[in-house]
Amino acid sequence: MGKVYSLAVTTLREMIRERIFWIVIVMAAGLFALSFLMGALSFAEQRKILTDFGFLSIQIAALGVSLFSGAYILAKEVEKQTCLLILSRPVTRQQFILGKTLGLLALITLLMGALASVLWILLGMWKEPSMWKAFIEICIGLWFESVVILCAVILFSLVMRPVLALAAGAVVFLLGHWLGDLMFFAEKSQQESLVKVVEALQWVTPNLYRFNWKSAYFLENGISNSNFLWMIAHMSGWTLLTVVVTGFLFRRKDIV
Amino acid sequence: MSTEAFAIKVTKLNKTFKGGIFEKDRHILKDVSFSIPKGTTTGFVGGNGSGKTTSIKCLFDFIHPDSGTIEFFGQPLSNDIKTRIGYLPERPYLYEFLTGTELLKLHWNLCFGKTTPEFYDRAREALNKVDLLDAKDRRLRTYSKGMLQRVGIAQAIMTQPDLLILDEPMSGLDPDGRLMVKDILREEQKRGVTLFFSSHLLQDMEELCSNLVVINHGKIFFEGQINTFMAEYQSLEKAFREVKLKEGGPRG
């Protein structure tokens, strides 16, 4: 475990020392400022705008880091051959993948933790303990979403160019969010073949639309425990599956 | 000789890279076999594209051979075996966001799982050998090409391995740097380390190696003592030129 930890810490250090990470932070801070400004312009909906924009900023920042870092983390190692020295040590390829992935997970956790803390302060959450549970659950939902996208992009980057892996990750994200709408339109069209296609897509795509909890409604009314547990199980399943497949593919890969 | 007498024993290694739709498959390694006796220094010579780097990458399973076997100290490659090997790839691309000390610490932790007090002495000793003590806290991004090569050598020797595998360890170094690397390799020889390194610089081979493995177009056509090779061809450089012309010649 010490080896995986060392790789994870090194990956985290690498990402924090990258300029792009700080650009994402500045962009997220800009979105927060914008939401605060827009909230101030509104009479009755200040809190709703701030909540919606705030969680959206966290989602965009985490998604940006997942897509960009996930697409390039392994591709860069293979292309620059920096992984050769690491793999010449008593480290298996699975440990290497795990270390890299955990390093990025730590980065996303730090990023989201920092942004969520800012949002917590902006919303004055300390005055409303009844909303703490829902706030944390929404953040955890967003965290899992970015983790699933990250793991999917890392997997894609092993079989295609980084830029295509990034695009494929974005497609998975969009498809995951549009599955509900697609099913609605498929049922409305009454074409059985279309319904079957969307049903098939639901099996091969993370159902992100079911856990899109970032509106003020969920903050004020809470999320049911069963929904929350179902989200954790669904997202953990996808994460585990993609990490295992990535490990399998990387083990077979020739590092030329 | 028993298999334990060899630090490396490679038998009938084959590797073909699949071509694209309009490209032919490339048969890079053709029944490559050689052995490196323990405690010797062996040079691995061949022209560009002859299969040197591919062979070395196969040793570590970076490239999976289609057939053949590789043994280190009589055993297949494993984590235990890897702790006994120091490696420097061709043009060592290192994590440039790390400092020299951080790089060594990472490699120590990957070998032993944690940073033990012994690390600090070993890291200092290795950095001192490659004359990088003053630059140990600078990011690798600010190192020159020669300094990167030297810090790469420091990570390879820091764990005091039984076997050092170096791919072009002197490439890109100025005369001072080459001299320093040669001195380090001589020190490792005195420590009883088995050295296996590839180089285009044939003069370095003559200075350092007792044995030689020559590869051309993916085939080994000489394996043995450097003196035997020299007796036949007088100068290694001349020999290499002649040998290159004789594709598939007899093994020495």
Image (cartoon, helix red, strand yellow):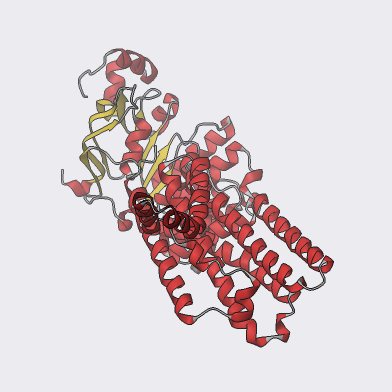
- Please state if A241 lies on the left or on the right of A63 as rendered: left
Which residue: 48% across, 37% down?
B182
Which residue: 47% across, 59% down?
A184
Residue nearer the viewer, B159 or A148 = A148
- Please state if B103 lies on the left or on the right of A200 as rendered: right
Q: Could you say where residue A14 lies in the image, as x and y percent from the top left?
A: 59, 54
Which residue: 30% across, 16% down?
B243
Q: Could you say where residue B113 lies in the image, as x and y percent from the top left?
A: 43, 65
Q: Residue furthest left?
A: B1
- Please state if B79 lies on the left or on the right of B4 as rendered: right
Q: Is residue B226 visible?
A: no
Q: Could you say where residue B212 lies in the image, as x and y percent from the top left?
A: 31, 30
Residue nearer the viewer, B10 or A146 = A146
**Considering the image in quadrants, where does the C terminus of chain B appear?**
top left
- Total of numbered circles in the picture? 0
Q: Could you say where residue B109 lies in the image, as x and y percent from the top left?
A: 47, 62
**Considering the image in quadrants, where does the N terminus of chain B appear?**
top left
Would you identify the image quadrant in which residue A247 lies? bottom left
Residue nearer the viewer, A249 or A206 = A206
Q: Is residue A211 above or below residue B46?
A: below
Q: Is residue B185 visible?
A: yes
Residue nearer the viewer, A248 or B210 = A248
- Please state if A224 lies on the left or on the right of B222 as rendered: right
